[in-house]
Image: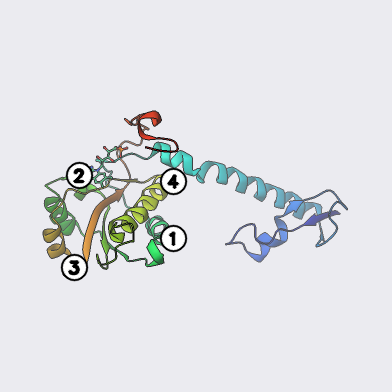
Amino acid sequence: MLRVKFRSNVWAGRSAWYDRHVGIVEAAGSNPAPSTKLSKRGFTIGCLYRWKKIFFNKVLNMKVSEAVRTRKSVRSYLDKTVEEDKLLAVLEAGRLAPSASNRQEWRFIVVKDTETKKKLAEAANSQSFVAEAFVVIAACAKTDEHVMSCGQACYPIDVAIALDHMTLAAVELGLGTCWIGAFNEGKVKEILGVPAEIRVVALMPLGYPYDSSVTNKKRLPLNEIVKYEHW
Ligand SMILES: Cc1cc2nc3c(=O)[nH]c(=O)nc-3n(C[C@H](O)[C@H](O)[C@H](O)COP(=O)(O)O)c2cc1C
């Protein structure tokens, strides 16, 4: 018999079975409480599951730095359904973003309808790839009224942060996105029935990329964009 300590919050979606069998196995007596006894079979199964979890964490849970490095604008999409849980995970990443005074004034319209997507692509200066994506998300702001004391309007910043969270979450899930800022706001509002006071900040196609290779980013070097201590 082995003495094991269970870490009950290891996995939010755990089952009682998981709690019973998967824990951090510690040398007998090294951490006596809380502890319980487990059969050798249970211990082996627990270890297998633990290693499986470690493996999948490594393979599937991409580091933020990796997502930042590999994200790119995707302008060609596969004709492939994006699973609902993936779509929700992307939206959830937006929901968790920070916003000025935590107002969370972003609102997202998820468009899957083929005809509506075509109309949106048309309104986006005829960027036809927009309609190729499984989903087009219209990122809106409830109001454009709030201005921070620094003089900056809150709404484009808040919506942009949420959208950027979403682009990175998409990369982790094997999906691609592209910011679309070139669109006619009036036309998009008409297509989607958006009320007058609501602003449409950006459109974002989301889908499986046709080409998921990593490309080199053309960016200015740090020494051109960073100054220390003063301008
Ligand atoms: C606010 C904003 C608006 C953009 N609008 C468009 C657009 O309308 N169409 C497009 O193809 N790309 C658009 N882009 C994508 C940029 O062209 C792209 O991010 C940039 O060239 C860097 O390439 P990368 O995203 O592959 O790293 C936009 C990006 C941002 C941040």
- Of mark 4 and mark 2, the one earlier in the sequence is 2
What residue did someone put label 4 on? 172
Q: Amino acid at mark 3?
A: Val
Say whether residue 110 is visible: no
Mark nearer the viewer, 1 or 4: 1
Front residue (pair 155, 126): 155
Left or right: 175 in relation to 47: left
Identify the residue shown where x is 65% and y is 50%. Answer: 49
Where does residue 73 sit, x and y in percent of width and height? Answer: 29, 40
Q: Amino acid at mark 2?
A: Phe
Name the mark nearer the viewer: 2 or 3: 3
Color scheme of the displayed model: rainbow
Residue on which disc 1 sits: 96
Task: Return the residue nearer the eye: 191 or 135.
Answer: 191
Query: Does mark 4 have its CB less than 8 Å from ligand 1?
Result: no
Residue type at the position of mark 1: Leu
Label 2 and label 3: CA atoms lie apart by 23 Å
Mark 4 residue element? helix
